Image (cartoon, rainbow, N blue to C red):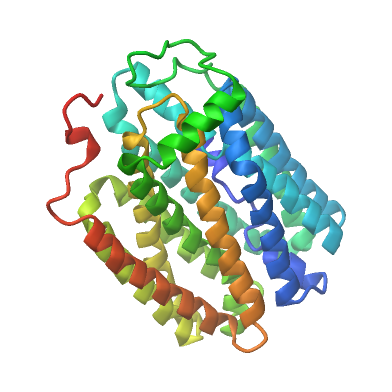
């Protein structure tokens, strides 16, 4: 499962794909519109696909999601036009919606079957760390690949990586019995119809026990969406085309470290970590020089740790059978936040630089950290401390 997580999280050898869009003549506003299409696909399909994952074998959806991801990069590389980029983002959005919620529920159920749900954060962190290390390798490899074969060569290399992820998904073990703590629900693989799962997931997402965790697990990843502009930020900061992948690689390395350290981060420290992360990214972006990526990278690593912690808290709070649906509700809210971020950059790009816009968004992250610090004080008790939790 960890190996699959590494590949499923991998942005392949084409980590600076925003440069492909720029090379094709797209403006910053057009690039942002592509990101909006990407996120809008998630918004439309996230929760419906989550309910689907609660009614069919989840491994099947993981395989399909990986195959669609492969199609995205193949389309982009073969036909580098705005229409093809938009179509590729639709495929990527569909892939993401099929996997989001599905994978987390798949892993949690396997751990629940082994009475090992307490290790969920460690397992997820290991998968994300492995993925980010592979991302680092891929990002570093992009520099010589682009230098020798150009952006198209990097694109086809990405297709090969995605195809490998699809093959690995096929080898995943079958679904485990689905976890729940409601004694009135049976424990087979067909816990109810599609609409029943959808209603159950939406209802649990609104339950006071879960709602705050759903919101927090949504908002933290939403702010990481501005990494889509890091390639453009590096160019604006004066970096050469060959150096851009290396600067992006610095942020990926920091994310890998953040994911690896996430199991050590107490939940009540999440708020302060977000404050520091937001200020660091803002300062690094405002520097408008390549050296500013050091601060950006450190802040981004802290954000990655916060994501693992917030998502783990959510999984421990879910008690019903519609685990993938509840997780997908959080994913939906995250995509809505990402769309807002992309729209902000698209509209703001006419009046301000990419660096300024990222700095502003990072200050918002810091403010969100202050709110999280109040919501999770030092006296907060994690759900697994409560009687009766497995």
The residue under the point 43% across, 11% down is 187
Answer with the quarter of the image where residue 167 lies: top right
The residue under the point 66% across, 36% down is 66
Residue closer to the observer: 144 or 135: 135
Quarter of the picture holding the C terminus: top left
Answer with the quarter of the image where residue 152 lies: bottom right
Whether 292 is drawn above or below 50: the answer is below
The residue under the point 29% across, 32% down is 119
Residue closer to the observer: 98 or 380: 380
The residue under the point 47% across, 39% down is 327
**Total numbered labels placed on residues in the image:** 0
Residue 297 in the image: state x and y as whole percent: 42, 68
Residue 316 in the image: state x and y as whole percent: 32, 35
Residue 142 is left or right of residue 371, and the answer is right
Whether 248 is drawn above or below 383: the answer is below
Residue 81 is left or right of residue 73, and the answer is right
């Amino acid at each position: 499962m960890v190996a699959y997580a590494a590949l499923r999280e991998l942005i392949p050898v084409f980590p600076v794909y925003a440069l492909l869009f720029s090379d094709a003549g797209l403006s910053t506003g057009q690039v942002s519109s592509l990101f909006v299409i990407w996120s809008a696909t998630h918004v439309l399909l996230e929760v419906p696909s989550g309910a689907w994952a609660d009614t069919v074998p989840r491994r099947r959806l993981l395989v399909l999601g990986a195959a669609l991801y492969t199609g995205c990069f193949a389309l982009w590389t073969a036909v580098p036009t705005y229409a093809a980029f938009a179509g590729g983002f639709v495929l990527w959005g569909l892939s993401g919606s099929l996997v989001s919620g599905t994978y987390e529920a798949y892993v949690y159920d396997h751990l629940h079957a082994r009475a090992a749900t307490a290790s969920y954060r460690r397992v997820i962190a290991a998968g994300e760390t492995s993925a980010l290390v592979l991302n680092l390798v891929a990002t570093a490899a992009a520099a010589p690949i682009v230098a020798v074969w150009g952006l198209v060569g990097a694109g086809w290399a990405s297709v090969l990586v995605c195809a490998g992820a699809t093959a690995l998904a096929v080898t995943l073990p079958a679904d485990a019995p689905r976890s729940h703590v409601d004694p009135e629900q049976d424990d087979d693989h067909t816990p109810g119809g599609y609409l029943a799962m959808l209603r159950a997931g939406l209802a649990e997402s609104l339950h006071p026990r879960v709602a705050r965790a759903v919101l927090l697990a949504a908002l933290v990843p939403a702010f990481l969406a501005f990494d889509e502009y890091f390639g453009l930020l590096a160019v604006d900061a004066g970096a050469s085309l060959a150096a851009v992948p290396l600067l992006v690689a610095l942020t990926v390395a920091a994310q890998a470290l953040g994911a690896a350290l996430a199991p050590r981060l107490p939940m009540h420290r999440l708020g302060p970590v977000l404050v520091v992360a937001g200020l660091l990214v803002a300062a690094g972006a405002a520097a408008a020089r390549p050296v500013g990526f050091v601060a950006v990278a450190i802040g981004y690593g802290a954000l990655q740790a916060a994501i693992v912690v917030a998502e783990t808290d959510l999984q421990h709070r879910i008690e019903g059978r519609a685990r993938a649906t509840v997780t997908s509700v959080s994913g939906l809210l995250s995509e809505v936040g990402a769309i807002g971020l992309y729209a902000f950059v698209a509209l703001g790009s006419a009046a301000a630089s990419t660096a300024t816009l990222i700095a502003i968004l990072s200050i918002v992250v810091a403010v969100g950290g202050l709110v999280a610090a109040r919501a999770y004080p030092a006296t907060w008790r994690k759900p697994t401390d409560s009687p009766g939790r497995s």
